[in-house]
Image (spheres, rainbow, N blue to C red):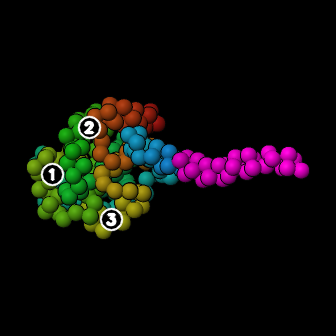
Amino acid sequence: MADATAPEPAEAPRRGRWFVALPLLVFAGLAALFFSQLDGSDKSRLPSALIGKPAPAFALPGLEGLQREGQPVPGLSTADLKGRVTVVNVFASWCAPCREEHPLLLELAKTPGVRLVGINYKDQPENARRFLGALGNPYAAVGVDAAGRSAIDWGVYGVPESFVIAPDGTIAYKQVGPISPEALKGPLREAIQRAASKG
C-alpha cells in the first residue's frame, strides 16, 4: 500500500509549481504588452475614428492682430478645408513640443499645392501672437479655439496634433504629437500625396 501511494508526493509539488508559475506567466505577458506600448514605436499613428470621414463642422474666429505678409490672417471654418489639400495643425504658445515642430511647419508651408492652417488651442491671444511673431507664421489661416470645443470635435488628445484634409473635405491622416523630420519626409508627405490624388 505504501508503494501505491508513493508517486503522489512527487506529483503534488509539480502541480503546486504550476499554480505558482501560472499567475507569474500571466503577469509577465501583461507586463510585456504594457511595455510594448511604451517603447519607441510611432505614437503618431494612433487610430482616429475620423479618418475617411468629413472634417467636423466648425467656425472659429481669427486671431486678432495676427498678420502674414502685411495682411490680416483670417479665421477658419469647415468651408476653408475644401478644394485643395489642407494640413490643419492644432497648436498653443504654452506647448513646448509646438515650439520644437515649428521650423518644420515653416518648411511644410512652402509645399506646393498644400495649404497649412492652424487651430490655436486654449491660448491667450497676446501669447499666441507673440509666439508666431517670434518664430514666424506659417499659417494661411488661424482659428481661435479658446474653450477647446472644436479640438474635442476633432478628437484631439493634446497639442500639437495635425490632420491632412483631402480636397473633398475628408480627413486623410492624423499626426499625434509634434511633426518630426522623419514624419515630414515619410508618413505625412505620403498622406499629403494620397490626399492630393483624391482631388
Element type at mark 3: loop
- Callout 3: few (<14), some (14-19), or many (20+) C-alpha neighbours within 10 Å? some
Predominant secondary structure in magenta? helix
The CA distance from mark 1 to mark 3 is 19 Å
Task: State the CA–CA distance, disc 2 to disc 1.
Answer: 15 Å
Q: List x then y, in percent, for residue 120.
A: 26, 58
Q: Position of residue 179 (x, y in %)?
A: 30, 42
Q: Secondary structure at mark 2?
A: helix
Of mark 1 and mark 3, the one earlier in the sequence is 1
Question: Which residue is the site of mark 3?
Answer: 148
* Residues in magenta, as a range: 1-29
Residue 136 seen: yes
C-beta proximity under 8 Å, tags 2 and 1: no
Image point 34% across, 44% down: which residue? 86
The percent coordinates of residue 32 (x first, y second) are 50, 45
User: What is the number of callouts on the image?
Assistant: 3
Residue at point 79%, 49% (across, down): 8
Q: Is residue 36 left or right of residue 14?
A: left
Q: Amino acid at mark 3?
A: Gly
Residue 100: x, y in percent?
A: 21, 45
Residue under pointer 1 = 132
Instruction: Kindly indicate the quadrant of the structure image that contains residue 44.
Output: top left
Q: Residue furthest front?
A: 2
Task: Give the residue at x 37% y 54%.
Answer: 79
Q: Residues within 10 Å of mark 1 (few under 14, many from 20)?
A: some
For mark 2, what is the residue? 108
Sequence-first tag of 3 and 2: 2
Q: Is residue 20 magenta?
A: yes
